Image (spheres, helix red, strand yellow):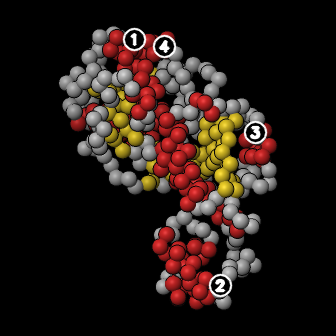
Amino acid sequence: MSITRVAKLAGVSSSTVSRVINNHPRVAPETAESVRKAMEKLGYTPSDRRPGPKPSLRTRTGAANIAFLVLGTARNRATPAFEGLVHGVSLATNQHDLNLIFTHSPDPDQLPPRIMSDRIDGVLLHGALPGKEVRERLRKLPAVWLMGNRRRPEWGDQVMPDSYEVGELAAKSLLSRGHKRLAFLNLDSGHWALRLYGHAFCSTGAEAGAEAKSIEQERQLTSGYWQEYSQESVEALVKRYLALSQKPTGIFVADDMQVAMIQPALQRHGVKIGPGEVEIVSCNNEKPYLVGLHPKPTEIDIRAESIGRRGVEQLIWRLEHPKVVERIVTTIEPFIVAADGHDDALVTSTAEKA
């Protein structure tokens, strides 16, 4: 029995049948169902002895086993965006019939033994970068990093927000409201992805003829990956803003954990925030952090759930293409949400960029 006969009965190409057999994520569900029905009707069973490369997902009996490993933080400190990320991973693993092991490792240099067992086919990673010994052990597994890390990962594929688009959206939103003096406020100047936010924000503002400044503080060391900022660092940042002779009226704050502290501090120092005054754009759309803020800032939604889903799909692709040496970095396009909860006029399409 040949793939050609299955393709003819299903009304598709032989390559499409091959993708269905290999559980390729880029096949429409209705097409995959048509192919499977044709295989069942013809009694066709794929053979692992067929010529050509064999995907890793078919090297074992049953579903593939993947692990989602969160490095450098405890379970009880999860951010709202991380919860969206986990939801996306869970949805995708169920859709593709994968076995998922989910675990936190507060010490990034100590891995749970089951993660390194030979029963793990691939791994999703999030959080702090591990030390040399753990890093070398993880390199042996197909891996995909999720979200934008403080330090850029040295190996593995990555699915993350489009950092440049985040900064551009923030600047364009403020420019559209007439602001000519802009500022990027950030309490973690060493964070690689947040630096990209600021660079894109200031560049977009400058190209439009606005004055754009970056006001950043160095992160204070803590025991966990998810940063908790001190009131002292917030005050220091706000004082630097207040010391400017011409204070920016359009402010982009790096994330919602930060805006929850920075906006009240600005207001305590007499800065009027709202339409026609100082206006703020923040990032991540993490509503629990916005409770108590008045007015609410405009938000950039980084689509954490989509990042989780796409990360699983990228890991499937990596399992099926183990000999591809180049790293694949995929960015997910964000969208902007106005302070009243409705999509901003600058909302972009939901296309993913690879």
**Residue drawn 36% across and 35% down?**
299
Q: Amino acid at mark 3?
A: Leu
Q: Which mark identifies residue 111?
A: 3
Instruction: For mark 3, give the secondary structure.
Output: loop
Label 1 – label 4 distance at C-alpha: 12 Å
> Mark 4 — residue?
231
Instruction: For mark 1, give the secondary structure.
Output: helix
Q: Amino acid at mark 1?
A: Lys
> Neighbour class for label 4 at 10 Å: few (<14), some, many (≥20)?
few
> Neighbour class for label 2 at 10 Å: few (<14), some, many (≥20)?
some
Q: Nearer the viewer, mark 4 or mark 2?
A: 2
Instruction: For mark 2, give the secondary structure.
Output: loop
> Neighbour class for label 3 at 10 Å: few (<14), some, many (≥20)?
some
Label 1 – label 3 distance at C-alpha: 42 Å
On screen, residue 56 above or below 169 = below
Q: Which mark identifies residue 198?
A: none
- Residue 260 spot, x, y in % from top left: 42, 23
**Residue drawn 48% across and 55% down?**
354
- Residue 316 spot, x, y in % from top left: 61, 60
Label 4 – label 2 distance at C-alpha: 66 Å
Assess whether mark 1 and mark 2 are in contact (beta carbons under 8 angstroms).
Answer: no
> Mark 2 — residue?
44
On screen, residue 11 above or below 348 = below
> Mark 1 — residue?
239
Q: Nearer the viewer, mark 1 or mark 4?
A: 4
